[in-house]
Amino acid sequence: MTATTAAAGRATGALLGLALGDALGFPTEFDDVPSILAKCGPWREMELPAPAFVTDDTQMTLALGRGLRTAMERGPLAPRRLERPVREEFVDWSRSPDNNRAPGHTCMVACGLLGDPDRPWQRASQVESKGCGANMRVAPLGLVPDLDDARRAGAAQLQAALTHGHPTALAASDLTAHAVRLLAHGTAPADLVPLLRSYAEENRTRYHHLWLGDLWTRTGDTGPERFIARGWDECLEVLDRLAEAVATVSAEDDPCEATGDGWIAEEALATGLLCFLLFPDEPVTALRRAACTRGDSDSLACLAGAFAGAHLGPGAWPAAWTERVEYRDELLALGALWDA
């Protein structure tokens, strides 16, 4: 497989993996490892709950996916063409009775402001927040075909900034989408971290004016390049920690001890990747490791699942799991659209 041709089914595999990780980690979020082991037994034997309910992570991923589908039906992806339907989907999600899975505070505040159609989205963005809600949902932008690097990066940062306007949230979302894209197009897991680090260095001072507008002016930074560099620098630091962890961490240790608990965007990326990279050819084990952590277990496991599914395709996941995961039909429909 070349680095430019996606293998069949990898969008479906990534979306299913994201939702399965989310559902596996849902019951363990907010628990420490001893409590999880007492409740679930040995972590390598954790079973998907029945029914397999997901959290706001999957719900917002689907909201982004629907908005992205609508935008691309209308023509080539562009800032305004993406912002309108995604904004509407996020607001609809925030007002839905199904939004009862402990949604993030930042997302709810920002969506409340986005509900005012006369408010520029930059004035709704929570510029001090770099919570993992920015990148837990960004996988669709690494899966949809026919996006060049510049449009994928701009779109990934825009969807993050609709709620989380901190530069690290933008950079981590960009990196997450890029990682999914690389894996779906055949990049070997062992090559992933160096490639992500090179990407971060290349983009360190690149502010996507077309996609982000005047967002940077809402901070105390002296210019847009200074603004975005703050985010990339924090991501570069955590990528260095990740590279060391991949080489030294025992699979039996809580990954959060090496790369962070995942409540913030750069740590969610790094720890989700670490769980995947510890078990690149054992996707279910990677999900179980991510779900049995002291940190944001559902977000960590959903990211690990997206990476594993993008790498291995839908065959990575047990049929007995995929048949009962919540929102299965919609996940399969989006996956089929982008795999086509």
Image: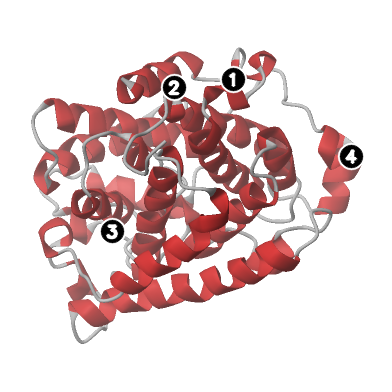
Q: Distance between the residues labelled 3 and 2?
A: 27 Å
Image position of 23 (left or right of 100): right
Q: Decide which of 271, 112 is in the foreground and name it.
A: 271
Which of the labelled discs sits on residue 331, or is there none? 2
Task: Say which label, 4 or 2, has the lower sequence index.
Answer: 4
Q: How far apart are marks 4 and 2 (CA)?
A: 29 Å
- Callout 3: helix, strand or loop? loop
- Residue drawn 77% across and 58% down? 254
**Amino acid, disc 2:** Leu
Disc 4: which residue: 42
Image position of 250 (left or right of 169): right
Q: Decide which of 11, 20 is in the foreground and name it.
A: 11
Tell me if I can see residue 269 in this picture: no
Which of the labelled discs sits on residue 125, or is there none? 3
Disc 1: which residue: 325
User: Are the two marked residues, 4 and 2, in contact with CB atoms closer than 8 angstroms?
Assistant: no
Task: Say which label, 3 or 2, has the lower sequence index.
Answer: 3
**Amino acid, disc 3:** Ser
Tell me if I can see residue 42 in this picture: yes
User: Are the two marked residues, 2 and 1, in contact with CB atoms closer than 8 angstroms?
Assistant: yes
Quarter of the figure that contains the N terminus = top left
How busy is the neighbourhood of tag 1: few (under 14 within 10 Å), some, or many (20 plus)? Answer: many
**Amino acid, disc 4:** Pro
Quarter of the figure that contains the C terminus = top left
- Callout 4: helix, strand or loop? loop
Image position of 79 (left or right of 69): left
- Residue drawn 60% across and 72% down? 241
Task: Say which label, 4 or 1, has the lower sequence index.
Answer: 4
Q: Distance between the residues labelled 4 and 1?
A: 22 Å
